[in-house]
Amino acid sequence: MFDHEKLDAYRLAVAFGAWVSPILDEVQPRGRRPNVLKHLDESATSVALNIAEGNGKRSLPDRIRYLEIARGSALECAACLDVLVARSRLAPDVASQGKATLVRIVSTITKLIERHLRDADASTSTSTSTSTSRKGPNR
């Protein structure tokens, strides 16, 4: 099992991608796919892919950047569902089901980002205090 597969955010993102798949097929008119469906498909895929790719990055700033992209893609999915409802292409109760999962995804990603930021602050303060203590006796 890859490390990213252990993350709740990743598992939720994959579940959302599976949930949205039949909607993409049902809402699509014959012969063409409206832009909102294309964006929904790409954004839903992007959430899981960016979580996985970011989790593989060694650099903490890179990890955070990919998680922020994943969070943005989840928010874009929510907006796509809103547009489909506004265009009477999706029932509001169906959109609410997907948005409930998206809220969990965004919340989980936000917590991961906050944890990484705390870790970065802790390592920065540790290295600062270490370098300060080294300078102290040499003065």
Image: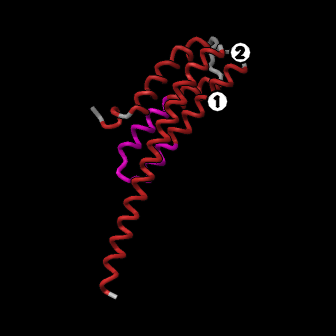
Q: Percent from the top left, x then y, of residue 94?
A: 60, 15
**Residue 50 lies in magenta, yes or no?**
yes
Q: Is residue 80 left or right of residue 129?
A: right
Total numbered labels: 2
Label located before the other in sequence (1 or 2): 1
Secondary structure found at label 2: loop
| Residue 41 or residue 105, whichever sits in front | 105
Q: Percent from the top left, x then y, of residue 7?
A: 37, 34
- The residue singled out by tag 2 in the image is 88
What residue appears at the point 56 percent right and 19 percent down from the top-left corner? 97
Q: Percent from the top left, x then y, of residue 69?
A: 52, 42
Q: Is residue 109 left or right of residue 56?
A: right
Q: Residues within 10 Å of mark 2 (few under 14, many from 20)?
A: few
Q: Which amino acid, by three-letter code, is at mark 1? A: Ala
Most common secondary structure along the magenta stretch? helix
- The residue singled out by tag 1 in the image is 79
Q: Percent from the top left, x then y, of residue 45?
A: 48, 29
Q: Is residue 115 left or right of residue 137?
A: right
Outermost residue on the left side: it is: 1
Q: Quadrant of the C terminus?
A: bottom left
* Image mark for residue 130: none
